[in-house]
Amino acid sequence: MKNKDKPLDKRDYGKVESLCTFKCNCRCVMCSVSGSIDDKKKIKTFKDVKKDIDIAAKAKARTFAFSGGEPTLRKDLLELASYAKKKIRNIEIQSNGRMYYYKDYCERLIEAGVNVFVVSFYSPFEDVHDRIMGVKGSYGQTLQGLKNLIGLGQTVKINIVILKFNYDHLAALVRFLLDLGVKEFRFIYVTLEGNVLKNPDSIAVSMSKAAPYLMEALKIGTKKVPCHVYNMVPCLLPGYEKNINDVMQSDTYLRGPDFECSIDDNRKKMKVKSPLCKECKYNKECYGVWKNYADFFGLKELKPVKRRHAKK
């Protein structure tokens, strides 16, 4: 939907997220916006990001998030965060975490009002993480950044994209990050877009193959911190259905440089189901899988979860 800077509708938007830049200091193998990276036309002006903040404040959003690209590359991020903090309770940055290597920068962001740090971290193994991020040395920088933020008493949440490179050691990654003091995990099954479409066989693993390893990681993580799962379906994660975004997540409104949309509405439009899904107890809550996933892997993995009938 084209961005017209209009007020949001009356639904409960837990978060408004601004894609404030597509400039990035990584080259992730699964980047979904790789075609826009470093496109100067897609770097929002200071005025445009302030508009996003004002719209979020009018909608009474609980969180405003800076994302991209890599938002920490914006020279005006501190000023924008300070402006947002005057209007909205939670100020979040979604980042690859490399800039947090500099502790003084972390301190300045905190002083400006940032109180939620969402950091991408993909493996406890340096070579795997660096390969995914596309930059040698990114592991060490991000790891030190996590230690800096946690040492400063900040809430750190981790984005973990599930790929062929890391799906079989998710549990080890969760243990590693819990020991550091991470407060939340967001497991995101990779979307078949951008860089992934160049060679999906080498990057994407089927959901059914990844699911047992994800459940092992969830078993460990959910005992200590909140865990959320994105882009997967309840029938493949028995016992963890309520951790899946389709079932439980409050809506986020996304504002890009030339579009805007409800993420929830977008999922409804862009996901598909198997005919058998009509028989599933989660049919109303679950939107299915992304169309690109269905085109590549098919829909045979989707098995309806039967409703329990009351005893006579």
Image (cartoon, rainbow, N blue to C red):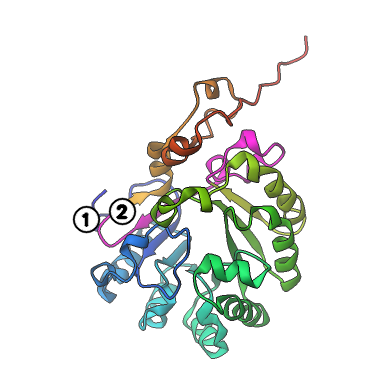
Disc count in the image?
2
Highlighted range, magenta = 231-259
Q: Is residue 187 above or below residue 66?
A: above
Secondary structure at numbered mark 1:
loop
Question: Is 240 one of the magenta-colored residues?
Answer: yes
Query: Which of the 4 image quadrants contains residue 103?
Result: bottom right
Badge 1 amino acid:
Lys
Residue 255 rendering spot, x and y as whole percentages: 33, 58
Quarter holding the C terminus is top right
Secondary structure at numbered mark 2:
strand
> Which residue sits at x=61%, y=51%?
228
Q: Which residue is mark 1?
A: 4
> Which residue sits at x=59%, y=80%?
145
103 and 176: which one is in front? 176
The reply to whether the C-beta atoms of the residues labelled 2 and 1 are less than 8 Å apart is yes
Residue 86 rendering spot, x and y as whole percentages: 42, 75
Residue 196 rendering spot, x and y as whole percentages: 44, 53
> Which residue sits at x=37%, y=47%?
10
Q: Is residue 132 above or below residue 1?
A: below
Residue 171 visible at all: yes
Q: Which residue is mark 2?
A: 260
Question: Farthest residue in the top direction?
Answer: 312
Q: Earlier in the sequence, mark 2 or mark 1?
A: 1
Question: Is 305 one of the magenta-colored residues?
Answer: no
Badge 2 amino acid:
Glu
User: Neighbour class for label 1 at 10 Å: few (<14), some, many (≥20)?
Assistant: few
> Which residue sits at x=45%, y=72%?
26
